[in-house]
Image: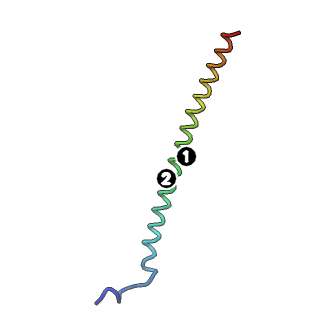
Amino acid sequence: MDVIWEYQGPQAAKPAVTESQDILLEMERLLYEDLREELIRKGTILTELYLLCLSYLRNLALKTT
């Protein structure tokens, strides 16, 4: 029997499409999670750098007065 006559219609192909969509959604979720964590790390580094500069400037101001 030819394969063309065994075609079940779009319902048969739907699980593969749904599975692909699920994979893409999971990849997107992981990407945004990674980006969020990177922004948090960068924010922490910038905060530490800001506090270090502020401490240096306060120390410098104390020495000049």
Residue 7, placed above or below residue 38: below
Q: Secondary structure at mark 1?
A: helix
Q: Residue at x 47, y 57 (%)?
A: 27
Residue 24, placed above or below residue 7: above
Q: Nearer the viewer, residue 63 or 51?
A: 63
**Three-letter amino acid code at disc 1?**
Arg
In the picture, measured across the screen, residue 9 lies left or right of residue 64, that is left
Q: Nearer the viewer, residue 63 or 4?
A: 63
x and y, in percent, of residue 52 in the image? 59, 24
In the picture, measured across the screen, residue 5 lies left or right of residue 64, that is left
Residue 30's disc is 2
Task: For marks 2 and 1, give the CA distance.
Answer: 10 Å
x and y, in percent, of residue 29 in the image? 51, 55
- For residue 39, which quarter of the picture? top right
**Three-letter amino acid code at disc 2?**
Leu
x and y, in percent, of residue 64 in the image? 68, 10
Q: Residue at x 46, y 75 (%)?
A: 14
Residue 36's disc is 1
